[in-house]
Amino acid sequence: MTAAASSRLRRPGLGTPVIIVGALLLVAVCLFPFVWMGLSSIKQLNELYTIPPRWWPDNPTLANYYKVLFQSRIPRYFLNSVIISVGSTGLALILAIFAANGFARFRFRGRSFWQAFILVGQLLPTAAIIVPLFITLKVLGLVNTYWGLILVYMIITLPLSVWMLTSYFKAIPIELEEAAIIDGASRVGILFRITLPLSMPGIVAVLVYAFITTWNEFIFALCFATDSTVKTLPIGLAEFSTEFNTDWGAIMAASMVMTIPIALLFLVFQKLFVGGLTAGATKG
C-alpha cells in the first residue's frame, strides 16, 4: 500500500498530541476542586484567607481532622448516612429489579405509557413534593427516623433506576429465557439465575447512582431529619458555618471524610458502572 493510499485510509480527526493535551487539561480541571479541598483541610485558619492564595501550607496540620473526628458529631452523621444510603439503595434496587423485569419481559395494556409515566416523579421539582412528603411522614410518624429518609430517598431514586434496568433487561436475548423455560425453570428462577448475572453492569450502575444520590442529598435531610440522631453528613457540614463565623478548615476536612467513601465506591466499580450506564442509555 502506497503512502498516498495509507493517508487516505486514515480517519480524519485531531492528532494524538492534541488529544493528550486536551485529556490532561480535562483531568486537571476535574481534579482541581479535590486537590484544593485536600490542601485546605491541612491548612491553619489564617492560611485559608491569604491573598493571593497559597497552594501548599507553610505549617501543615491535622488539627482540622482531629476536630472533625473527635470534637464534633461528624462520626455519628457518617454512620447515619451509611445506614440511610445503604437502606434506601438496597430497597430501591430490589423494587427496580422486579419492576424493570416486568416492563422488559411482560406485555400488557399501557406498558409504554406506564413506563414513561414512571419518570414523571423524576421530573417534579423538589419544592413541589417536599410538603406532601412531609405531611405523609408526619402522619405515619416517620419524621426524624431512619425509615422516613430511607423511604423518601427510595422514592427519588426509584424512577431512574427502573428506567435504566428496563433498558438493560431488554438487551438480553429472550431466547436464553425461553430455553430455560423449556428446561423447567420458573420466572423467578430465570430472573435470579440468568437475567441478573447477565445484567450485573446495569445493576452496578443503578447501585452507584442511587448511593451517590442519597449520600449527597441535602434538602430532604434538612427538612425531615432535624434531630442529631438521624442527621446526615451534608447537614453536619453546614453546622460548621454559623451566623458570625465559618470554620473552612473543618468544612474541608469533613468534606474529605465525606468524599472518600464515594471515591472508593466508584473506583471499585468503575468499569461495571461505565459499561452499565452506557448500555442503559443506548440500548432499547
Image: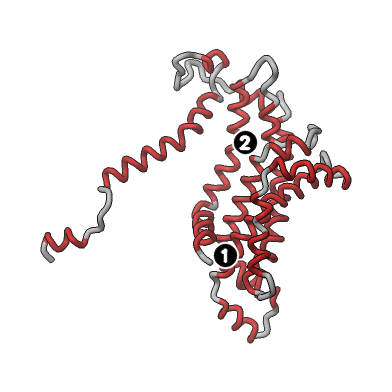
Q: Quadrant of residue 195?
A: bottom right
Q: Marks 2 and 1, how far apart in space?
A: 32 Å
Q: Give the class, few, some or many, for how many residues have Cα within 10 Å of label 2's Cα (few <14, many ≥20).
A: some
Q: Is residue 63 above or below residue 103?
A: above
What residue is shown at x 83% (from left), y 47% (from top)? Answer: 136
In the picture, the quarter occupied by the N terminus is: bottom left
Q: Secondary structure at mark 2?
A: helix
Q: Quadrant of residue 125?
A: top right
Looking at this view, is 51 or 43 the one in front? 51
> Residue 223 bears which disc, if any?
none
Is residue 84 shown left or right of residue 37?
right
Q: Which residue is mark 2?
A: 258
Q: Which residue is mark 1?
A: 167
Identify residue type, mark 2. Answer: Met
Looking at this view, is 8 or 81 the one in front? 8
Q: Secondary structure at mark 1?
A: helix
Identify residue type, mark 1. Answer: Ser
What residue is shown at x 70% (from left), y 54% (from top)? Answer: 90
How far across and how far down the image is residue 132, in percent? 79, 45
